[in-house]
Amino acid sequence: MSSWVTILDMTETIFSVQGLFKRYGDNTVVSDMSFDIAPGECLGVIGPNGAGKTTTIRMCLGLTVPDAGNVTAFGLQMPQDALAIKAQLGVVSQMDTLDPDFSCAENLLVYGRYFGLKDAQIRERIPSLLEFASLTAKATAKPGELSGGMKRRLSLARALVNNPRLLLLDEPTTGLDPQARHLMWERLQLLLQQGKSILLTTHFMDEAERLCSRLLVVDHGKKIAEGAPRDLIRQHLEPDVVEVYGAGALALVDSPLKSMAARVEVSGETVFFYTQQARPLLAALEAYPALRTLHRPANLEDLFLKLTGRQIREDA
């Protein structure tokens, strides 16, 4: 285990959000938002664009003052104790904020100074941070020489320079190819195993299911569901999904096959049958050889679409 990692007491709550509200004019963007985070827990926040995720994160960081409610962390109150709280946080934003004029090692050094760390202390941590990010060979390279995945790993390493107790990650793998995403997931899982806590926003449902011990589903500024990923799927969805597509698939919506499913939804040219038992439906579909079918278990994407709808939202 690297020297900059600290194992934490898994019984305490280190971060608590209670009853947050935020309004801009007549528009309520966050309404009665509450959640807690324990040591070693990854809490995921998922929801459509404009659901209030970013505003909630900004209030957690003390960058936006709530109209009501409170944020407490490590026994301290936000925003009154913002500096003391931020000293124990690590943040990776959506946008690349690395300094292009500094090398990888220099980015870590300069960032550590913002927390009042002495250069000798930071330099002692740099090798293990670069090793954690698989960037040891890139210590003297500048961000412009790195791939997108390398930049994200460097941002994560930089967020760890102050040995934070809680990481706030805003869509940390957006824009990465599958190999880079999987390597990032591996690093985040390692941090969780070592006792770090994570607050994660993501649009990747497989990422949420892989990393998060608990999820908040938010829409229109409100928390509409909360729980472990598999528990939420069992609670809100039928266990089997049969996707049918191809010429003539849409006609099945008004066919007798509809009665063989608990729910039927359409997206584009694909018909989704949500059912407790897929076998009879699959047998009936054999009468339509021109159609293509996919039988799979219900997943977080199905949950997301059921709770928030299939309509595309404009960026907020």
Image (tube, rainbow, N blue to C red):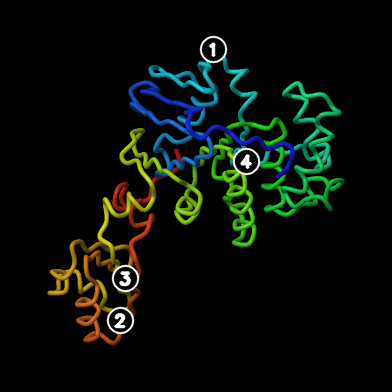
Residue found 16% across the figure and 69% down from its top: 258
Q: Which mark is residue 95?
A: 4
Q: Secondary structure at mark 4?
A: loop
Q: Secondary structure at mark 2?
A: loop
Three-letter code for the amino acid on which mark 4 is drawn: Met
Please state, as top left, top right, bottom left or bottom right, where the N terminus lies in the image.
Answer: top right
Residue highlighted by disc 2: 291
Q: Quadrant of residue 218?
A: top left
Residue found 58% across the figure and 33% down from its top: 8
Q: Nearer the viewer, mark 3 or mark 2?
A: 3
Left or right for 315, reference 81: left
Give the spatial CA distance, label 2 vs label 4: 43 Å
Residue highlighted by disc 3: 243
Q: Nearer the viewer, residue 156 or 312?
A: 156
Residue 311 image offset from top left, x and y in percent: 33, 51
Few, some or many residues within 10 Å of mark 1 (<14, 14–19, 20+): few
Three-letter code for the amino acid on which mark 1 is drawn: Gln
Give the spatial CA distance, label 3 vs label 4: 36 Å
Q: Nearer the viewer, mark 4 or mark 1?
A: 1
Vertical arrangement, residue 280 with respect to residue 156, above or below: below
Single out the residue that lies furthest toward the top. 80
Q: Which mark is residue 88?
A: none
Q: Secondary structure at mark 3?
A: strand
Three-letter code for the amino acid on which mark 2 is drawn: Leu
Residue 165 image offset from top left, x and y in percent: 60, 31
Please state, as top left, top right, bottom left or bottom right, where the C terminus lies in the image.
Answer: top left
Q: Nearer the viewer, mark 3 or mark 1?
A: 1
For marks 3 and 4 on the same chain, the one whose residue lies earlier in the sequence: 4
Give the spatial CA distance, label 2 vs label 1: 61 Å
Callouts 2 and 1 close, C-beta under 8 Å: no
Few, some or many residues within 10 Å of mark 2 (<14, 14–19, 20+): some
